[in-house]
Each structure stands twice: as C-alpha cells, then as structure tokens.
Image (cartoon, helix red, strand yellow):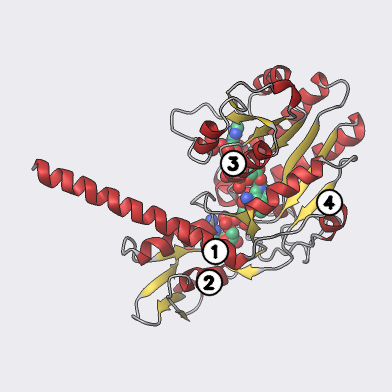
Amino acid sequence: MGWNLSKFPVAFITGITGQDGAYLAEFLLDKGYIVHGLRQPSTLPDLINIEDLCIRYNGKFFLHYGDMTDGSVLHRILLHIKPDEIYHLAAQSHVKISFDSPEYTANVNGLGTLRLLEAIRTIDKDRKIRFYQASTSELFGSTPFPQCETSPFEPCSPYATAKLYSYWTVKNYRKSYGIHASNGILFNHESPIRGEEFVTRKITKAVARISMGQQNILMLGNLDSKRDWGHAKDYVRGMWLMLQQEKADDYVLATGKTYKVRDFVEKAFAKIDIKLKWQGKGLNEKAIDTATGRVVVAVDKELFRPQEVHCLIGNPEKAKNMLGWSTDISLDELIEEMVEADIKIAKSEANNNLISENVICSNG
Ligand code: NAP
Ligand code: F7E
C-alpha cells in the first residue's frame, strides 16, 4: 500500500514484542501513527504478539534490531527514524528473575533508560521528542498504601531498584535539559498476552488446561500478596495521554482496588464452574475442588521471593483529573477474557496433538 508517510506522527516503542508494546502499537497505529519498534536480536521467534500488526499495517509498522545494552544502536535508530514520541517499555520485567539476574536487570532496566535519554539529548537539539518511561508500582515496595505520586519509595527487589534509577534519571533529564520526559508509575496490568511466568496468566492458563484435563494441579507461591490489577488495554491509553500534555510529569495509573492472589485463583476457577475450598496453612495450604474433592492448587516454597511486596493499591486521582484517564475494564471482565483465550489455546493444542497422533497412527 502506498502511504504518504510524511504526514503521520512517528512513534518509537522499545519492548514492542511484549504485552504493553503490542497493545500500544495497535492503539497508535489505529490512531494513524507510523510505528517503529525495537526488537532484540534473537534466533528464536519473538513476534507472536505483533504478527497480525505486521500484516495489517504493512508500510506503517517497522521493526529494528537492537538491545537496550547497546547505546550506539539506539542513537543510530533515533537519527534514522526521527520520532515525535518515544515509549520506552523494554525491560527485564520479572521481579523474581531479577533476584537471580541482578546485574543484567540493572544494566537493561536502569542504564538502558540512561542510554536512550543520552541519545535524545544529543540528537534532539530542539527538544521536540516526547519521552515516556515505564515506571512501576514496585518502586513503592513496602510503603503504606494506597500509594500515589507523592508516596515514599521503598523498592524491595533488584528490578525495583533498577527502575528507581530510571525514574530519577527521567526527572533529572526533564529538569536539567528540558526534555519532555514522563514517568508512568503503573500498577499491575494484565491481558490474554501477559507473559506466562506472571501469576495471573499462570493461573488462567492452568485453569484452562485443568478444564481440558491437560493439567492436574497449579503450584503457586505467596497466595496472600495483594495486587491492584487492571487490563493492559486501559493502561496503554494512559501512556499516550501522558505524552499529549503540554508539560511532562509523572502519573500513577491504577484501579484503586486490590485483591489477594487467592482471590484471583478463586475467580478464575469460578469461570469453569469449579468452586474451591481452602485447607491447611502456609506451605501446606491446598485448594480443593468441592465437587470432586480433588486438590487443584498447592503451594511450592520455591516460588516465594527473597523479599515480597505484600500490598499494592494505587490512587489514580491525578491521572483522572489531569489526563481524564480511567479504567473501562473490570477485574472480572479481565479474568473472563484471559480464561476464555487460554481455553481456546488449550483446545487448539489438544486438536494439534490429536492430528499428530493420527498422522503417527496412519503412518505406523
Ligand atoms: P514484557 O511483556 O515482559 O515485555 C518486555 C519487553 O522488553 C519485551 O518486548 C522484551 O523483548 C523487551 N526487552 C527485554 N530485554 C530487552 C533488552 N535487553 N533490549 C531490548 N528489549 C528488551 O513487559 P510488559 O508487561 O509489556 O511491561 C512493559 C514495561 O512496563 C516493562 O518495562 C515493565 O517493567 C513495565 N511495567 C509493567 C507492568 C505490568 O503490570 N505489565 C507494570 C508496571 C511497569 P523480548 O520479547 O525479545 O523478550
Ligand atoms: O507476581 C505472587 C508474587 O510476577 C504478583 C511485573 O509486571 O507487576 C509485575 O510484577 C504476585 C507476587 O507480578 C506466584 O509473589 C504467587 O506477590 O505476577 P507477578 P509482580 O511481581 O507484581 C509490576 C507492577 C511490574 O512492574 C513488573 O514488571 O503474585 N505469586 N505465586 C506468584 N508470582 C508468580 N510470578 N508466580 C507464582 O507462581
């Protein structure tokens, strides 16, 4: 298709292959943006979340190889594509993994932001580029709740300390060099394309597989930690709104409600008509399917973290008042969408297995 590309705003998204990157890319493409994304050099297929966009928006959607640990590539990409807006989402985003890989996490999540801001500082002399940084509720750690923009930070993981470095670097580049740079302090947001290692997706995937007889039991860590969970679709709209403001600033995006991991488990099982009864305490706690007496959830101490963030509840008043942002999708709707999507995947896996079994049978 022959687009006249010069009349469209240009966005650059790091982390485009992840959950938020995929939702944000679609949101911006639908608004008429040209979207460029950073894709890590990898031998493994990594485009599953954005395959459809590559086809639907051919000619307006571009991918560039690069890594947040390589500042020279970031510099070259910015010179080449001349973005109006940059959404910096790339990160080693798993909190538990950050305890095992603290130096890598600091390099990507902390210094990666510095590299990108340095590239902007040198290239964008007129300060036209608007910059969004994916900050996080993990900065609050064990601070009293509800948490808002002025709450103190008390990060409890290498992930959070690296993100705190990025948060302050953004503020410093805003004040020192006049760059339009904003921190979005986002509370947990999920979707059917959430990484399978995060607790919500791990739960909905297991629920779907249990309903299909493909899995017997779901092993979890801390069932009592509380999170403020929203839908990623609502949160990427908030990122865009931040960059449409005349002045850059920092905003909390959250639902203002919190639930325990065990509540999420109960709600997800309820979607397949399984009612749970909890028995035992601590590491011996189990959830039993009341209809069959079968244990469907148990606790594994390996899944606990060296330090836990026990309770997060965000206060999104500032974003509501200044950006006109609010959430459209409730937790129940989110869980329903996730379970339904995972049931579809489980069914198609079952069909594929059946087909390959038939092929083996007919060949043998
Ligand atoms: P995600 O699904 O884990 O996506 C992370 C993205 O970063 C992926 O595209 C990944 O590429 C890319 N990436 C990782 N290391 C990289 C590197 N060294 N160089 C270049 N790219 C790299 O995370 P998400 O849930 O979409 O979250 C987006 C951002 O928001 C992250 O910064 C996260 O820390 C932050 N955040 C998320 C939440 C949430 O609840 N989702 C809340 C607050 C803040 P591959 O696909 O190749 O691995
Ligand atoms: O854990 C508990 C776990 O890994 C949520 C990232 O997007 O949001 C995310 O970080 C809670 C924790 O997300 C399991 O201990 C119990 O208390 O889904 P999670 P997270 O750590 O909150 C923030 C805002 C980000 O910025 C991050 O990038 O669930 N939990 N059992 C478990 N968690 C996992 N992953 N797996 C379990 O088996």
Who is closer to the viewer here, 224 or 58? 58
Residue that carries the numbered disc 2 in the rendered image: 267
The answer to whether 8 is drawn above or below residue 198 in the figure is above
Question: Which tag, 2 or 4, sits closer to the chain's start?
Answer: 2
Q: Which residue is disc 1 drawn over?
A: 335
Q: Which residue type does callout 3 highlight?
A: Ala
Image quadrant occupied by the N terminus: top right
Assess whether mark 1 and mark 2 are in contact (beta carbons under 8 angstroms).
Answer: yes
Work out how far the residue at label 3 is from the one at label 2, CA to CA, in angstroms: 26 Å
Q: Residue at x 41, y 78 (%)?
A: 288
Horizontal side of 278 relative to 2 (left or right) equals left
Calculate the distance from the C-alpha at mark 2 to the C-alpha at mark 4. Answer: 31 Å
Q: Is mark 2 within 8 Å of ligand 2?
A: no
Residue 219: x and y, percent? 43, 64
Q: Residues within 10 Å of mark 3 (few under 14, many from 20)?
A: many
Counting residues from the start of the chain, the first of labels 1 and 4 encountered is 4
